[in-house]
Image (cartoon, rainbow, N blue to C red):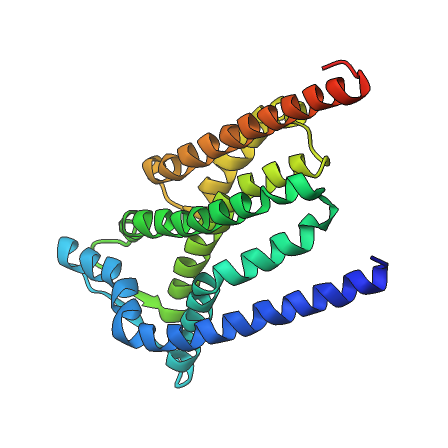
């Protein structure tokens, strides 16, 4: 396709993704009132019960409650609609593959969705521990009144960041399949990758508790090496096929 045709296709896929997110937002708006808000504030309530300190989430402005609910609904919409917009991403990237390689598209798509949701779940699981450690720095004679916007921003960014990070290995394998990134290049950069992962988890969990950081870092490192292994298998198959067809060294 020409550049203009690529841009038209990208516009269509972005529009489809946006519609899916909006539909997901409607469900998120309903779920926020029924379940999500209680789950978000539960870590703060646990802190109050465990320490005996005053720990509450406060809404400092008249419109903040509406803004927070809209923000939560938008985030839930992204998560709920992830099968749609992840598919649109893959569908836009794979036209460069041949017929045989297109068969792997479904495998990428099918693995990206559970990995994204698994990452979101991992971020959610470490959230109570992170809140507990961070609020432990509040002096004994003081109370922890958390501004709703800042607290919700922290929770949602943590969950989404970990979810997206868990999908990165799938894109690494995809880049290998389209010939952009070789398995040798992936494994050559393993030290840098581990350093980036550790720094990312340290930022995503701004806590003095290193346990939370490593609970996130370890599965991400495992996924990185799993991506390298799949890329290695693919490169070997390609080399053997080239050797059989063109007499190239395997």
Residue situated in front as seen by the camera: 208 or 189: 189
When asked about the image quadrant of residue 52, the answer is bottom left
| Position of the N terminus by quadrant | bottom right
Q: Is residue 126 left or right of residue 241?
A: left
Q: Is residue 144 left or right of residue 152?
A: left
Count of all numbered marks drawn on residues in the image: 0
Q: Is residue 223 left or right of residue 177?
A: left
Residue shown at the point (37%, 70%) measured from the top left: 148
What x and y, as percent, mark residue 131? 30, 53
Q: Is residue 190 left or right of residue 245?
A: left
Residue shown at the point (66%, 34%) measured from the top left: 176
What x and y, as percent, mark residue 200? 51, 41
What x and y, as percent, mark residue 77? 45, 68
When asked about the image quadrant of residue 70, the answer is bottom left
Residue shown at the point (60%, 70%) measured from the top left: 16
Question: Which residue appears farthest toward the front when viewing the image?
Answer: 245
Residue shown at the point (28%, 47%) measured from the top left: 129
Whether residue 111 can be seen here: yes
């Amino acid at each position: 396709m020409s550049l203009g045709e690529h841009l038209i296709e990208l516009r269509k896929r972005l529009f489809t993704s946006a519609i899916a997110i909006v539909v997901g937002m409607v469900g998120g708006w309903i779920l926020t009132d029924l379940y999500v808000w209680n789950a978000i504030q539960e870590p703060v309530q646990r802190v109050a019960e465990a320490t005996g300190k005053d720990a509450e989430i406060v809404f400092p402005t008249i419109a903040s409650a509406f803004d927070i609910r809209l923000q939560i609904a938008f985030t839930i919409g992204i998560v709920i609609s992830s099968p749609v917009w992840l598919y649109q991403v893959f569908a836009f990237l794979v036209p460069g593959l041949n017929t045989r390689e297109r068969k792997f598209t479904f495998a990428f798509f099918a693995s990206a969705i559970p990995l994204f949701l698994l990452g979101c779940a991992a971020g959610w699981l470490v959230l109570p521990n992170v809140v507990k450690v961070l609020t432990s720095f509040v002096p004994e004679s003081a109370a922890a009144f958390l501004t709703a916007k800042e607290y919700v921003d922290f929770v949602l960014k943590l969950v989404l960041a970990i979810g997206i990070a868990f999908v990165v290995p799938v894109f690494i394998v995809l880049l290998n399949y389209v010939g952009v990134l070789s398995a040798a290049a992936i494994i050559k950069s393993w030290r840098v990758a581990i350093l980036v992962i550790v720094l990312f988890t340290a930022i995503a969990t701004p806590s003095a508790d290193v346990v939370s950081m490593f609970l996130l870092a370890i599965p991400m490192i495992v996924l990185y090496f799993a991506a390298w292994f799949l890329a290695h298998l693919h490169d070997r198959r390609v080399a053997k096929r080239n050797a059989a067809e063109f007499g190239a060294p395997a």
